[in-house]
Amino acid sequence: MKGARRRVGAFLTRPGVFYPLLGLLASVVLVVGLSSFSSQIVSAWMRRDMDLRAELIFRSLHDQASSSRASESGALSRVMEQIAADGRILGLAFCAKDGRLAITTSAMPANLDCAEFMRQAVWNATLVTPNGARIRLNFFPLTVASTTGKLLVAHDLGVIEQRERDVRLYVTAALTAVAVGFAFLAAVLTLALRRSWMQSLRRAIDESHKPAADTERAGGPANVDRQINAMLADIRGRRKFIHGVSVKWSPDALRQLLNDELPEARVLTVSNREPYIHNRIDGAIRLQIPASGLVSALEPVMRACRGVWIAHGGGSADRDMVDAHDRLVVPPDDPAYSLRRVWLSEEEQDGYYYGAANEGLWPLCHIAFIRPTFREQDWACYKAVNQRFADIVVEEANCDNPVILVQDYHFALLPRMIRKRLPKATIVTFWHIPWPNAETFSICPWREEILDGLLGSSVLGFHTQFHCNNFFDSADRLIECRIDRENSSVWLRGAETLVRPYPISIEWPSRVLARQAPVAQCRANVQARFGLKDDVRIAVGVERFDYTKGILDRMRAVDDLLTMSPQWREKFVLIQVAAPTRSKLEAYAALQHEAERLATEINGKYERHGWKPIQLVVRHHEPDEVFELFRAADACVVSSLHDGMNLVAKEFVAARDDERGVLILSSFAGAAFELPEALIVNPYDAHGMAKAFDRALRMSPEEQAERMRVMVEQISERNVYRWAAQMLLDAAWLRKRQKIAERA
């Protein structure tokens, strides 16, 4: 008997038996634990789903309840019955403030105590019906016509209990099968690994007398260890940065990414507009930061990358500030990167910038109903200037594989030109404006050259997936290429270009905000500057004078507001800041003239006691001045007729650390996809915008704070450093693929 027990004990403790049995036991414990855990997850998920569905129902009923139609007999009750017909909803009810059950659907329990629910401070509760069924109730404050109370949304918790039972059954069955298979596989692998380990041990003993150099040349353990360690280091780097959820993106994080993923890479940025302009004013040289979304987005990135920014030097004193190689170090107060200025003649400016770029490509890509103008001489100049920039990029690169960030529609041909000179370069092109649909783009006489030029990029970025899809359609329709929609790339002549959405953003936290006075002081400064009384509500608009920005439309909306709601007369003002731009072009000069005329007309219609509803300020404003306006305002209006992103909307949110203010945002701006908590408007609908103004001016501080907190969270997490990191990570991935291909 003792011998039998010893034999059984010896059998069970053998490596080939003990570990599989231990694995089986662990699997059983895992099955029990996971089945219980899974049911809890399902329960929590379904409760959360019920809460979200209840909130959606409340939001859909809120406007219906407050409308004039809600006062009609039974109108809201019919809507509630229609919603309750959804099989996932048990019923709906409305309890008046006095404890009366005012409206209820047919399936609601009979033992509802409205008086009890009106005393509840929480927003959900569990109720047991007379027949023992358990229901989950969510309730929300609601006003039906003039009656205040709470909306009750009921879900049957029996659905959750049944789903928990199903999950436990399915998970237990599945994991049991996996556990049995795992135990069998573990036994086989244990025996195989034991045999392999013994063979390796014998081989190591045999080779222990050989020189170490011979062992490594033979691909021995030292070489294998180095390869494994290198692979693990690479995986750790990827996991750290690809999973951006765990990274708080900042200049330091971006620099760390460059060190880990693009070590020793030379980073160059190319744009038409320079980040710092030197102008001679009244005999003195003054520094100006241009009002440009591109500059405000890229400048923090370049400070983090410490590379070279190549741009057109258009300031009247720009030549006086550069060295013999047309370079200077910027920013002046904290030098971080080099600015290389490129000089263009007036003729080149007229053809490349004003002609091909802004009379041709700009209206082509924006739906603003301005016909693009295409001139062959402009296009010849555009190509020549792109080639000039390509030569300077090669000169500044100092290596054969730099990382080059090409910016915007001014340089559609530049990626291909650089690719011909630097085949190993990683070229990331970002198109800052919308990309039109294929039919619209096809009217461009240079369409094939533009597509070919852009597809010289390694990575091509747009603000939204919609613009990416338009580009795919244009390439598929107009040139011979292969579209790989699964991997979001285009193959042209054997080379691949990744096409990705990278929604551009702003610096966070904002250095401009850190320099601002408190909100009360900013408001007092603005009131004093414009002669406004304390009770006057302020809306601001900050743009360049551009026909895509909808400046005239928001002025007409102000006119409609004062006609529709006379109580805002002498109580509301729109401060419209507009910086002159591209004044050589007739469309821009005409816009400025029309805006000034319209402002005068509307002011003349309503002006009294020195109050004017529209304050039009035609001059450039520095970032500190813009942020002061944002902090003083009750609302900010961004009414773009068509826009790639529009960073003014995000800057307004960044300026309001007091969680006050309302953003009125055009649905045709890319920012509307990221900031749906703003009041989204159609800028072509003046009356609809007027109602949005009225709603913004009446919005409670609590609702303002709730909306602002969500937008702040979005912008702080998806800041400009994350935008740059996404593109640089894709660039790093392509460089690694290129190295593997070269070795192969």
Image (cartoon, rainbow, N blue to C red):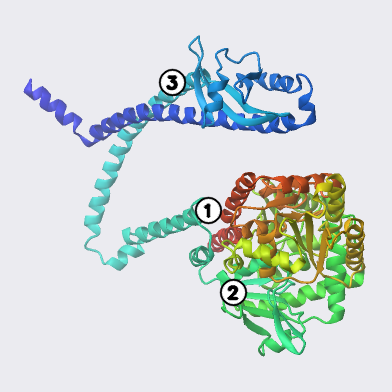
Q: Residues within 10 Å of mark 1 (few under 14, many from 20)?
A: some
Q: Is residue 706 above or below residue 453?
A: above
Q: CA distance from mark 2 to mark 3?
A: 59 Å
Of the 4 image quadrants, the one containing the C terminus is bottom right
Foreground: 299 or 84? Answer: 84
- Residue that carries the numbered disc 3 in the rendered image: 169
Query: In the image, residue 518 lies at what x, y percent?
Result: 59, 63
Please identify, in this view, whether the residue under mark 3 or under mark 1 is nearer the observer.
1
The residue type indicated by label 3 comes to Leu
- Marks 1 and 2 in Cβ contact (< 8 Å): no
Query: In the image, residue 369 lies at what x, y percent?
Result: 90, 55
The residue type indicated by label 2 comes to Gly
For the point 11% across and 27% down, the residue is 6
Any part of residue 421 in sight: yes
- Residue that carries the numbered disc 1 in the rendered image: 244
Tell me, for residue 407, which label it has, or none.
none
